[in-house]
Amino acid sequence: MDVNLNGRVAVVTGGTAGIGLATAELFAREGAQIAICSSRQSNVDRALTLLRDRGLKPYGETLDVSSRQGTFDFAERVERHFGGIDIWVSNAAIMVEKKLVDTPEELWQRTMDVNLKSVYYGGLVAADKIRKRGGGVLINAASFASLMPAVGSGAYAASKAAITSMTRSLAGELAPYNIRVVAFVPGLIETPMTANWIARKGKALASQHALNRIGRADEVANALLFLASDYASFITGTCLEITGGKFCVQNPADAWN
Protein backbone atom coordinates (compact mmCIF):
# COMPACT_ATOMS: atom_id res chain seq x y z
CA MET A 1 0.00 0.00 0.00
CA ASP A 2 1.45 3.34 -1.07
CA VAL A 3 0.08 5.94 1.34
CA ASN A 4 1.27 9.36 0.28
CA LEU A 5 0.25 12.97 0.62
CA ASN A 6 2.00 14.31 -2.45
CA GLY A 7 0.91 17.80 -3.41
CA ARG A 8 -0.99 18.45 -0.20
CA VAL A 9 -0.46 21.07 2.46
CA ALA A 10 -0.91 20.02 6.08
CA VAL A 11 -1.02 22.16 9.21
CA VAL A 12 -0.26 20.58 12.59
CA THR A 13 -0.97 22.73 15.63
CA GLY A 14 1.18 21.83 18.58
CA GLY A 15 3.47 20.36 15.95
CA THR A 16 6.75 20.97 17.73
CA ALA A 17 6.84 18.00 20.13
CA GLY A 18 5.32 14.62 20.86
CA ILE A 19 2.51 13.39 18.64
CA GLY A 20 2.40 16.67 16.74
CA LEU A 21 6.06 16.62 15.77
CA ALA A 22 5.97 12.93 14.84
CA THR A 23 2.92 13.59 12.67
CA ALA A 24 4.45 16.62 10.97
CA GLU A 25 7.63 14.70 10.16
CA LEU A 26 5.79 11.66 8.82
CA PHE A 27 3.42 13.74 6.70
CA ALA A 28 6.39 15.61 5.25
CA ARG A 29 8.21 12.37 4.46
CA GLU A 30 5.09 11.19 2.66
CA GLY A 31 5.08 14.21 0.36
CA ALA A 32 3.08 16.87 2.18
CA GLN A 33 4.19 20.44 2.66
CA ILE A 34 4.06 21.03 6.39
CA ALA A 35 3.29 24.00 8.62
CA ILE A 36 3.67 23.74 12.39
CA CYS A 37 3.01 26.07 15.28
CA SER A 38 3.50 26.36 19.01
CA SER A 39 2.88 28.99 21.64
CA ARG A 40 6.64 29.32 22.28
CA GLN A 41 9.18 30.56 19.77
CA SER A 42 11.90 28.36 21.27
CA ASN A 43 9.78 25.27 20.56
CA VAL A 44 9.18 26.38 16.98
CA ASP A 45 12.86 27.08 16.40
CA ARG A 46 13.93 23.73 17.82
CA ALA A 47 11.40 21.77 15.76
CA LEU A 48 12.20 23.64 12.54
CA THR A 49 15.90 22.98 13.03
CA LEU A 50 15.31 19.29 13.72
CA LEU A 51 13.09 18.82 10.67
CA ARG A 52 15.40 20.78 8.38
CA ASP A 53 18.40 18.80 9.62
CA ARG A 54 16.49 15.71 8.49
CA GLY A 55 16.12 17.08 4.97
CA LEU A 56 12.58 18.45 5.26
CA LYS A 57 11.26 21.94 4.47
CA PRO A 58 8.70 22.93 7.11
CA TYR A 59 7.09 26.30 7.75
CA GLY A 60 6.57 27.34 11.36
CA GLU A 61 5.32 30.17 13.54
CA THR A 62 4.23 30.91 17.06
CA LEU A 63 0.46 30.85 17.56
CA ASP A 64 -1.96 31.19 20.44
CA VAL A 65 -4.50 28.61 19.24
CA SER A 66 -7.12 30.10 21.56
CA SER A 67 -7.16 33.26 19.42
CA ARG A 68 -9.64 33.22 16.55
CA GLN A 69 -7.96 36.11 14.75
CA GLY A 70 -4.51 34.67 15.37
CA THR A 71 -5.56 31.32 13.95
CA PHE A 72 -7.02 32.88 10.82
CA ASP A 73 -3.98 35.11 10.33
CA PHE A 74 -1.71 32.06 10.64
CA ALA A 75 -3.84 30.15 8.13
CA GLU A 76 -3.64 33.09 5.73
CA ARG A 77 0.15 33.10 5.92
CA VAL A 78 0.33 29.34 5.39
CA GLU A 79 -1.98 29.70 2.40
CA ARG A 80 0.21 32.40 0.90
CA HIS A 81 3.37 30.42 1.58
CA PHE A 82 2.22 27.08 0.14
CA GLY A 83 -0.76 28.05 -2.03
CA GLY A 84 -3.50 26.47 0.07
CA ILE A 85 -4.38 24.12 2.93
CA ASP A 86 -5.66 20.55 2.52
CA ILE A 87 -5.23 18.99 5.97
CA TRP A 88 -5.58 20.60 9.39
CA VAL A 89 -4.57 18.64 12.50
CA SER A 90 -5.86 20.29 15.69
CA ASN A 91 -3.38 18.77 18.10
CA ALA A 92 -2.41 21.57 20.50
CA ALA A 93 -3.51 21.03 24.09
CA ILE A 94 -2.70 21.74 27.72
CA MET A 95 -3.39 19.70 30.84
CA VAL A 96 -4.14 21.04 34.32
CA GLU A 97 -3.31 18.43 36.94
CA LYS A 98 -5.89 19.40 39.55
CA LYS A 99 -9.13 17.94 40.83
CA LEU A 100 -12.14 19.74 39.38
CA VAL A 101 -13.17 21.06 42.79
CA ASP A 102 -9.70 22.58 43.21
CA THR A 103 -9.36 24.01 39.71
CA PRO A 104 -9.42 27.83 39.63
CA GLU A 105 -11.90 29.19 37.13
CA GLU A 106 -9.17 30.88 35.13
CA LEU A 107 -7.39 27.52 34.64
CA TRP A 108 -10.67 25.85 33.67
CA GLN A 109 -11.30 28.57 31.11
CA ARG A 110 -7.75 28.45 29.78
CA THR A 111 -8.07 24.68 29.28
CA MET A 112 -11.29 25.15 27.32
CA ASP A 113 -9.79 27.99 25.30
CA VAL A 114 -6.70 26.05 24.24
CA ASN A 115 -8.13 22.55 23.91
CA LEU A 116 -11.67 23.17 22.67
CA LYS A 117 -11.81 26.60 21.06
CA SER A 118 -8.81 25.67 18.94
CA VAL A 119 -10.75 22.75 17.43
CA TYR A 120 -13.68 25.04 16.70
CA TYR A 121 -11.35 27.50 14.99
CA GLY A 122 -9.84 24.62 13.02
CA GLY A 123 -13.32 23.83 11.78
CA LEU A 124 -13.80 27.42 10.68
CA VAL A 125 -10.49 27.35 8.83
CA ALA A 126 -11.51 24.11 7.15
CA ALA A 127 -14.80 25.65 6.04
CA ASP A 128 -12.86 28.54 4.52
CA LYS A 129 -9.43 27.39 3.34
CA ILE A 130 -9.86 23.65 2.78
CA ARG A 131 -13.20 24.21 1.08
CA LYS A 132 -11.46 26.34 -1.54
CA ARG A 133 -9.23 23.36 -2.42
CA GLY A 134 -12.24 21.20 -3.21
CA GLY A 135 -12.08 19.23 0.02
CA GLY A 136 -9.67 17.78 2.51
CA VAL A 137 -9.39 16.49 6.05
CA LEU A 138 -9.72 17.95 9.54
CA ILE A 139 -8.22 15.75 12.27
CA ASN A 140 -8.89 16.52 15.94
CA ALA A 141 -6.98 15.25 18.96
CA ALA A 142 -9.28 13.77 21.58
CA SER A 143 -8.01 11.53 24.39
CA PHE A 144 -8.81 8.33 26.25
CA ALA A 145 -9.65 10.76 29.06
CA SER A 146 -12.72 11.72 27.03
CA LEU A 147 -14.00 8.16 27.55
CA MET A 148 -12.51 7.40 30.96
CA PRO A 149 -11.51 10.50 32.96
CA ALA A 150 -8.78 10.32 35.57
CA VAL A 151 -9.03 11.86 39.01
CA GLY A 152 -6.93 15.00 38.93
CA SER A 153 -7.41 16.10 35.32
CA GLY A 154 -11.13 16.77 35.04
CA ALA A 155 -10.89 19.98 33.04
CA TYR A 156 -8.72 18.27 30.44
CA ALA A 157 -11.11 15.29 30.24
CA ALA A 158 -14.13 17.55 29.81
CA SER A 159 -12.48 19.49 27.01
CA LYS A 160 -11.54 16.29 25.18
CA ALA A 161 -15.04 14.81 25.56
CA ALA A 162 -16.46 17.93 23.95
CA ILE A 163 -14.05 17.50 21.04
CA THR A 164 -15.54 14.12 20.15
CA SER A 165 -19.00 15.67 19.91
CA MET A 166 -17.75 18.67 17.95
CA THR A 167 -16.00 16.33 15.53
CA ARG A 168 -19.30 14.67 14.66
CA SER A 169 -21.07 18.01 14.29
CA LEU A 170 -18.37 19.38 12.00
CA ALA A 171 -18.34 16.16 9.98
CA GLY A 172 -22.03 16.55 9.25
CA GLU A 173 -21.77 20.23 8.40
CA LEU A 174 -18.66 20.03 6.22
CA ALA A 175 -19.49 16.82 4.33
CA PRO A 176 -21.17 18.70 1.43
CA TYR A 177 -17.81 20.37 0.77
CA ASN A 178 -15.92 17.05 0.57
CA ILE A 179 -14.25 17.74 3.91
CA ARG A 180 -13.85 14.74 6.20
CA VAL A 181 -13.63 15.34 9.94
CA VAL A 182 -12.25 12.69 12.28
CA ALA A 183 -10.87 12.53 15.80
CA PHE A 184 -8.26 10.25 17.30
CA VAL A 185 -8.18 8.89 20.83
CA PRO A 186 -4.64 8.00 21.89
CA GLY A 187 -3.92 5.85 24.89
CA LEU A 188 -0.97 6.66 27.09
CA ILE A 189 1.74 7.84 24.70
CA GLU A 190 5.26 8.82 25.68
CA THR A 191 5.35 12.60 25.10
CA PRO A 192 6.51 15.68 27.02
CA MET A 193 2.94 16.11 28.33
CA THR A 194 2.86 12.62 29.86
CA ALA A 195 6.48 12.48 31.03
CA ASN A 196 5.67 13.16 34.70
CA TRP A 197 2.97 10.50 34.85
CA ILE A 198 5.19 7.93 33.21
CA ALA A 199 8.12 8.74 35.49
CA ARG A 200 5.93 8.30 38.57
CA LYS A 201 3.99 5.17 37.66
CA GLY A 202 4.86 4.01 34.18
CA LYS A 203 4.70 0.25 34.87
CA ALA A 204 1.25 0.47 36.45
CA LEU A 205 -0.03 2.64 33.62
CA ALA A 206 1.38 0.31 30.98
CA SER A 207 -0.44 -2.64 32.55
CA GLN A 208 -3.78 -0.92 31.88
CA HIS A 209 -3.27 -1.54 28.15
CA ALA A 210 -3.86 -4.97 26.62
CA LEU A 211 -0.49 -4.68 24.88
CA ASN A 212 1.09 -4.03 28.30
CA ARG A 213 3.20 -1.09 27.23
CA ILE A 214 3.13 2.64 26.68
CA GLY A 215 2.65 3.83 23.11
CA ARG A 216 5.01 5.87 20.98
CA ALA A 217 4.26 9.11 19.15
CA ASP A 218 5.23 7.59 15.80
CA GLU A 219 2.60 4.87 16.25
CA VAL A 220 -0.07 7.55 16.52
CA ALA A 221 1.38 9.41 13.54
CA ASN A 222 1.11 6.25 11.43
CA ALA A 223 -2.62 6.08 12.13
CA LEU A 224 -3.08 9.77 11.37
CA LEU A 225 -1.31 9.32 8.05
CA PHE A 226 -3.94 6.75 7.13
CA LEU A 227 -6.77 9.05 8.23
CA ALA A 228 -5.35 11.92 6.18
CA SER A 229 -4.89 9.77 3.08
CA ASP A 230 -7.25 8.73 0.31
CA TYR A 231 -7.34 5.24 1.82
CA ALA A 232 -9.66 6.70 4.49
CA SER A 233 -11.91 8.42 1.95
CA PHE A 234 -15.12 6.93 3.42
CA ILE A 235 -14.23 7.65 7.05
CA THR A 236 -15.71 10.75 8.67
CA GLY A 237 -17.49 11.72 11.87
CA THR A 238 -15.82 9.05 13.98
CA CYS A 239 -13.08 8.69 16.59
CA LEU A 240 -10.22 6.26 16.02
CA GLU A 241 -8.91 4.67 19.22
CA ILE A 242 -5.13 4.24 19.26
CA THR A 243 -4.95 2.90 22.78
CA GLY A 244 -3.07 -0.38 22.77
CA GLY A 245 -6.29 -2.09 23.85
CA LYS A 246 -6.97 0.06 26.90
CA PHE A 247 -10.72 -0.47 26.69
CA CYS A 248 -11.03 -4.00 25.30
CA VAL A 249 -11.14 -5.86 28.65
CA GLN A 250 -11.42 -4.89 32.31
CA ASN A 251 -8.35 -6.81 33.44
CA PRO A 252 -5.70 -6.74 30.69
CA ALA A 253 -2.82 -7.43 33.08
CA ASP A 254 -4.22 -10.88 33.92
CA ALA A 255 -3.37 -12.10 30.42
CA TRP A 256 0.30 -11.42 31.12
CA ASN A 257 0.46 -13.26 34.45
Image: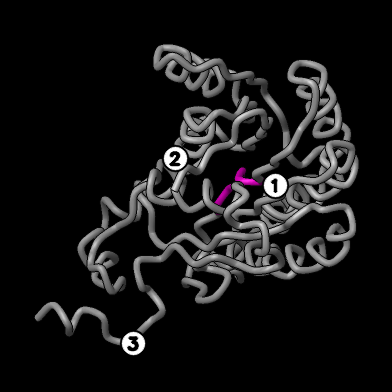
Which residue is the site of mark 3?
Answer: 250
Magenta highlight range: 90-95
| Viewer-closest of 92 and 131 | 131
Residue 234, how many percent across, how many down? 67, 63
Reading the image, the residue beneath label 1 is 114
Of residues 156 and 18, which is closer to you in this image? 18
For the point 66% across and 28% down, the residue is 7
* Residue 99 position in % (x across, y down): 54, 67
Q: Nearer the viewer, residue 81 or 212?
A: 81
Q: Residue 235: x, y in percent?
A: 65, 64
Q: What amino acid type should be assigned to the residue bearing mark 1?
A: Val
Could you tell me how far apart the alpha carbons at marks 1 and 3 are, in whole angstroms? 32 Å
Local SS, label 2? helix
Above or below for 77 versus 221: above
Query: How are the residues colored?
Result: one colour
Magenta residues, dominant SS class: loop
Q: Secondary structure at mark 1?
A: helix
Q: Is the C terminus in the top left, top right, bottom left or bottom right quadrant?
A: bottom left
Circle 3: is it few (<14), some (14-19), or many (20+) Cα within 10 Å? Answer: few
CA gap between label 2 and label 3 equals 28 Å
Please give the name of the residue rendered at 88% of the width and 47% of the height, measured from the top-left corner: 127
State which mark lies toward you, 1 or 3.
Answer: 3
